[in-house]
Image (cartoon, helix red, strand yellow):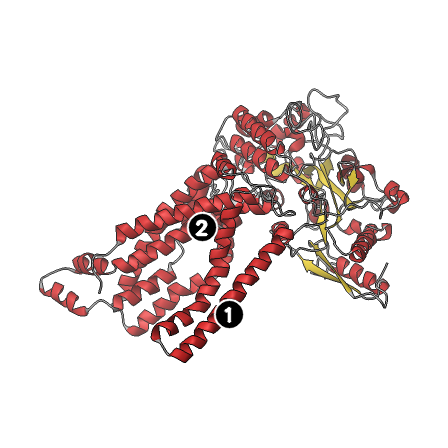
Amino acid sequence: IGCGADRKPLTIKIWEFPRWRESPDSIDRFTWMKRQIVEFERAHEGVSVELTELTWERGEDKKRIAIAAGVGPDIITGMLPVQLIEQGLAEPVKGYMTAAERADFFEPAVETFTYDGELYGWPWYLTGSVMFLNLELFERYGVAPPGPNWNYDAFLDVARRLTRDLDGDGESDAYGFGFLVSPGDTGVWPFLFPDGVAFASASATKGEGGFLDHSRIGLDRLYELIHKERVAPIQCAGWDSEGMWQRFTNRRDIAMAPWGIWAIPKLRAIPDFKFDVRAYPAPDFSQPDSSARAFIGTSGFVVLRQTDANKRDLCMEFARFLTRPEAQRDLSLYGVFPSRKSVGNIYEDDELMARAQAVIRGGQTVPRHGNWAKADEKLQREFQLALLGEKPAAAAISEGVKQIKEILAQAPERDTSGHAGRGRDRMVVVIWTVLGIGLVLTICMMFSAWRVRMASSSAFGFLCPALMVFAVFMFFPLCWVAVLSFQNYSVAQDSSGWVGLENLRTAFRDAAFVRAAWNTLIYSVVVVPANLLSALVVASLIYPLSQRARSFFRGAYYLPGVASVVTIAMVWRWMFNEDFGLFNTLAGFLGLPETRWLTDPRVALWSVILTSVARPPGGPILTYLAALDAIPTLLYDAGEIDGASAVKKWLHITVPLLKPTTLFLALTITVASFQVFAQVLVLTDGGPGYATEVIVHRIYTAAIRDFDFGVASAMSLILFVVIMVASVLQYRFFRSEFEY
């Protein structure tokens, strides 16, 4: 399949994540994909492949945003995108994969990419988690590594013997076990679901039966490992993967932990790090020679909806080209297992990978459902709260199962008509229409002002460009969000129908949104007065200085505000790090106990608040300095004649006369505080549990990660009303009775 002389050149857009380095000297993790693109373009004249390099940090969210906006790629990589399939945005492979090719794929790979009996995507590789052992700690404490077949009792005995109180303070310093409880991570699921996850089918979500009705949840077992046996640190319930990796590889105070098999080549690259892999310990009620089934994942290439049949054929051909057997042999550099049988054993002389492969081949997958990502987030955050001691395990399980069943019962409508994106196209047409009308009005008003030479017309004419920008980028989106608030909006369709106030009721019933509202209120109540007061005090101290000194401090306070919020948040994340961060390092130097800044639910929100309070309010300081220039010096002279001290002059002259400026700054800072987002996203992503969830982050999660645009729009409308009410109240409180 290609582009002949009678066909137009075609461009295939593929978005890919960084994979492996081709050589130790290389820093480019996209070299393999670039080489495949060159080979494919050479074999298909007139076809070009455009590669967009994503990052693991936020690449998945970027991809979702682009697809929702209608500007996404033609081919995506990753696990089966059930949500996109149910939205009618993914192409089935039927008619492109031959029977011989299908038979060449391992059954777990084909099963993972099959939904409602239809195959979507070309499986690329198999991966999953296994138990990793830090053999250095086993040797140090004289503990023999477990055999290949072990049960939970043997695991607990080993974990107890590896847990040590090294400084004699009664608290463990080295732990036998560590794990993650995080949305999207299934490494610890063989402990949580020791007898597997019962999920009848993708459509069995209404009425009786379905998810978890016959599953035993081992949350109480993990709770005992932390709080009763003390063989696992309590922090792990709020860790991210980076935090646990640092403990396992750098501090080396965790002896056993579940990791994806990607960790094997990474650990081999660490000098003097000795490790081994094992299957998960079998549940205590299983046969002694069995093991708990790992949860596996299959990554592949999925072609998104194409209206051009020729381009669809080329996209499928490129996906087949990327998953051909000779290309999958390179997966040995990545530490994963090929999806095709004809590739053979690419780890013939690697005993570790052979054992890991045996575990993965016998694994199981998570339920495939369009709302599974949302359900998984709810469930895992409830587990986090229980393991952190914030609520009983039974209550967390009950609430999690209740929420997950409600979510899975929401069966989204599928669109197979090929008209995906019609609503977005209509929105674009409306935007360009508004833009064109605004441009025409601007030209007419400018011409009228030039002809008539009337001051009022001229002023209105010059306002038109700003009004046009406001209408297109502010007023129209606000109206659009208001409309979506009353719809069950679908990415692939114009809408799924009007639902009245149901989205608003859903928002208020959402425990995460309610918690986010309280967290946002606490954040604003602390940050707004703190920033106003600090800006006013600093500006008052700078103002009496010489012009040169004043200019220096203006720049010194304003320049930090130029830096990206994300960059600043990354610096704070390093300072908050529990293992090597600045704050805990200073605490240890002073003999103070370490603080779990971002993993303790009672501290995490205040840590986020600290990042905003401690940041110099450069903009407000400059605004106050400009306002201080407008205060007549005669007033200060009169106060000094009357014997007023510097403090009294500041309280009775400066502060009252700066009331209009304070009103302006209070409004702007309040709006910004209610819209806090970047700090939370980078520092905690709303966790642990919902301890740092804020409104905008909740809106972001509902819209981008869950594709619940109607509910997200309703939340946005609620936030708009709250900000409007807060602004009116502040205006009435700060309103000055005079002008100067």
Q: Is label 2 or label 1 in front?
A: 1
Q: Amino acid at mark 1?
A: Val
User: Looking at the rendering, which quadrant does residue 161 occupy?
Assistant: top right
718 left or right of 136 in image: left
The residue lying toward the viewer, choosing from 726 and 274, is 726
Please tell me the numbered disc located at residue 440.
1
Q: Is residue 380 above or below residue 289?
A: below
- For the residue carrying disc 2, how many other residues have a C-alpha within 10 Å: few (<14), some (14-19), or many (20+)? some
Instruction: Name the spot of residue 568 as percent of width and height, x first.
Output: 48, 56
Dot 2 falls on a residue whose secondary structure is: loop
Q: Is residue 229 above or below residue 428?
A: above
Per the image, the residue denoted by label 2 is 675
Instruction: Name the spot of residue 289 as percent of width and height, x first.
Output: 77, 24
Instruction: Name the spot of residue 95 as percent of width and height, x first.
Output: 85, 46
Instruction: Name the spot of residue 404 as percent of width and height, x first.
Output: 59, 31
Q: Is residue 220 above or below residue 236?
A: above
